[in-house]
Amino acid sequence: MLTTLAGASPAFTTATVTPTSITTTTIATPTLWIVTVAGIIALFAADFVVTRRPHDPSMREAVGWSAFYIAVPVAFGAWLWAAYGSTQGIEFYTGYLVEKSLSVDNLFVFIVLLAAFAVPRELRQRVLLLGVAGALVLRAVFIAVGAQLIATFSWTFLLFGAILLVTAVKVGRDALAHRDHGVDIQQLRSVRIVRRFYPVTDAYAGTRLTVHRDGRRALTPLALVAVAILGTDIVFAVDSVPAVYGITGDPYLVFITNAFALLGLRALYFVLENALSALVHLGHGLALILAFIGVKLVLHWAHGEWPAVPEIPTLLSLGVIVGILGTVTVTSLLATRRAPDTPIPDDERQPTG
């Protein structure tokens, strides 16, 4: 049953399912959804125009686009704060910060994949953009399923919390063990499945995903690497979507934070490509963040069952997340500064998932 919150605008609604379910709210009207999706599509279209001619972007170009894709969500959050209040504004900024942190860690996997497939530098923008577009569609599905589960079953928050706690343990172990994150592309399940049904050429053909060979359609390596990146994002979504649901129960805010975090990955890759190896403690920080949000979700579920159980407020969550990220950044820089002439080995960092 859909009811309007007392004293709220008609756009702010709450879905009440059963007496034991946890109430979910959304600020989104059909109009807001349409405008938002249209805006996301327009930004993707602009990115495809930018990458229509293969080229290796300069640092100035990459920094410019990265700054743009940070300014857009910052401005959107300010509008959200003014239009709907501080609660929604804080939830948006906290969710965006979590998603951006996880997406930066995911760039390690993208770097490894692009190197493993020997993708020419001038084609990497297009590969990343294809992967991001597919990832956003996949996450929209995950978000919709998550929203339905939350609205139907009160234990969904407990399930999400358990997923994040298990993921946090894995990420923490990998970070402590300095486990190698190399990729054998022949062992990737997505690659094996595609090769089973379609022939694949040995050489790239510009930005083309398919070519005619021996009278039939064949995939280029560009298509394979796009599929590989899309496949890895399925794993990433398992922790990133529940993580944002730990900040806000509004599916619209979950979607838009994911969208903004993904949109800037193309440019951010070229900005951080050489600097990522310096963040040697990022895995430790992300493990702590995922564990913290996992505990927050479990407490949220428990509060719905037993009101005496305390909850962690979103503003405190924002402070904890900022504190963890700031701490691991400083400690990473100090750790790398102690040995400036020693190259950081590849196994100093382990990506999420």
Image (cartoon, helix red, strand yellow):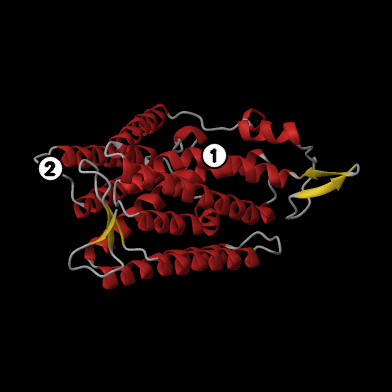
Left or right of residue 119: residue 284: left
Disc 1 or 2, which lies upstream in sequence? 1
Q: CA distance from mark 1 to mark 2?
A: 36 Å
In this orientation, which residue lies closer to the viewer: 214 or 123?
Answer: 214
Give the label, 1 or 2, closer to the camera: 2
Q: Secondary structure at mark 2?
A: loop
Q: Secondary structure at mark 1?
A: helix
Q: Quadrant of residue 129?
A: bottom right
Residue 232: image tag:
1
Residue 107: image tag:
none
Q: Position of residue 288 (x, y in %)?
A: 30, 38
Q: What's the residue at 56%, 32% (across, down)?
A: 182
Q: What's the residue at 39%, 44% (across, down)?
A: 146
In this orientation, which residue lies closer to the viewer: 112 or 137?
Answer: 137
Q: Is residue 61 above or below residue 342?
A: below
State which quarter of the image contains the C terminus. Answer: top left
Q: Position of residue 123 (x, y in %)?
A: 68, 54
Residue 82 visible within the image: yes
Residue 331 visible within the image: no
Left or right of residue 136: residue 73: left
Q: Where does label 2 land, which residue? A: 310
Q: Is residue 141 above or below residue 309?
A: below
Q: Quadrant of residue 218?
A: top right
The type of residue carrying mark 1 is: Thr
Q: Quadrant of residue 349?
A: top left
**10 Å crowding of disc 1: few (<14), some (14-19), many (20+):** many
Left or right of residue 8: residue 278: right
